[in-house]
Every structure is written in structure tokens, then in C-alpha cells.
Amino acid sequence: TQHILPARVDVVYALFGKSLQHIRISDMVKAHTLVGKTREELLSALEAARKELASLRVVQKTSGTPSRVCKIAGTRKDIARILTVFNSNERISARKMLADKPLNKWPKDLRPKLTRAKRRALPKALVNKKTIAAHKKLSNFAMRKYAVKPASA
């Protein structure tokens, strides 16, 4: 479904007092286009979006046109999208750098989340290990084997 724009956007804005942000779909930054970009490209896009937001804030204070003022929310969301992709890329590269170190040397926010029980569980090497006393007890009092006769039919 397409949104139909009235001839006078400023009149609609004045009447309803709502932002017409949902109409501005083609201008916004898409996350899937940001994923393939390098660190420098993301930082330059972030700087450009922040400059645009600053200019929009100036327009807002100087009673600019509503069509420009309603772009503020979209620009803020664009900045959030860029930062989200940037931070996820930074976390992925940090995990790659730490790949050869044991998990207990990693920062806690980069460790695998898992579940609380799995994070606290014993390592695989220690799960089936027994103490000397437990080993002696098992060998001295081994499970008994019974021969069960089949019931006569």
C-alpha cells in the first residue's frame, strides 16, 4: 500500500500535529546496505547523518518548514542504524582477535551468552572425573549383575 500525500503537507502537519515520517521511506538508510561497508565508510556516513541532524535542529529552532522538521526522527533512526551495524562489526572483529585465547580471558560482554546453567556447568573434561574415594567405592562395590530366568510360558 502506498501513502497518498496531500497537496499541502504543511497544512496537514498544522492540523494533526503529527510527523509525516512514515512517508519518507526511500530516503532512509537500510541496514542491509550498511553491513558490507568498511569501518571508515560507516564512520563517514555517521558523521554525515549527525551533520544533517544538526542542520535539521537549526531549521527546527528557526521555525523551518514542516517537511524539513519531520525528517528529524528519520535522521535519528538512521544514526541508530549506522551505530548498530558499526558496533556489531566491531564486536565480530574483536571476537576474531580473541579466538585463540581461552573464554575466561575474554571480556564478559563478548563471551557466548548460552544459558545461565550452561555457563555455570563443569567443563566437559571434569564432568565424568571421579575423586579417588569415589573411584575406590565404585570398584569395591560394583553394581551387581543378576541373571533373570525367563518366566515359564
Image (cartoon, rainbow, N blue to C red):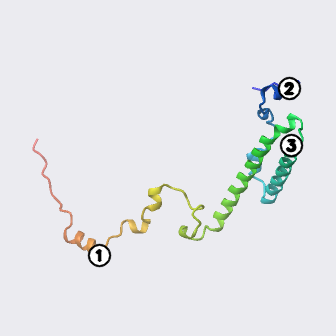
Q: CA distance from mark 1 to mark 3?
A: 78 Å
Element type where label 2 sits in the image: helix
**Which residue position holds label 1?**
132
Above or below for 75 versus 67? below
Residue for point 47% across, 56% down: 116
- Lower position in the chain sequence, tag 1 or tag 3: 3
Q: Mark 3 — residue?
A: 61
Please tell me whether residue 113 is drawn above or below residue 5 in the rendered image.
below
The quadrant the C terminus occupies is: top left
Left or right: where does residue 110 sit relative to residue 36? left
Foreground pick, 1 / 52: 52
Q: Along the polypeptide, which appears first: circle 2 or circle 3?
A: 2
Q: Nearer the viewer, residue 145 or 78?
A: 78
Point out residue 85 in the picture as x, y percentages from the top left corner: 72, 52
Amino acid found under the numbered disc labelled 3? Lys
Classify 10 Å Cα crowding around label 3: few (below 14), some (14-19), many (20 and above).
Answer: few
Return the residue at label 2: 11
Measured as percent of width and height from the top left, residue 70 is found at 82, 37
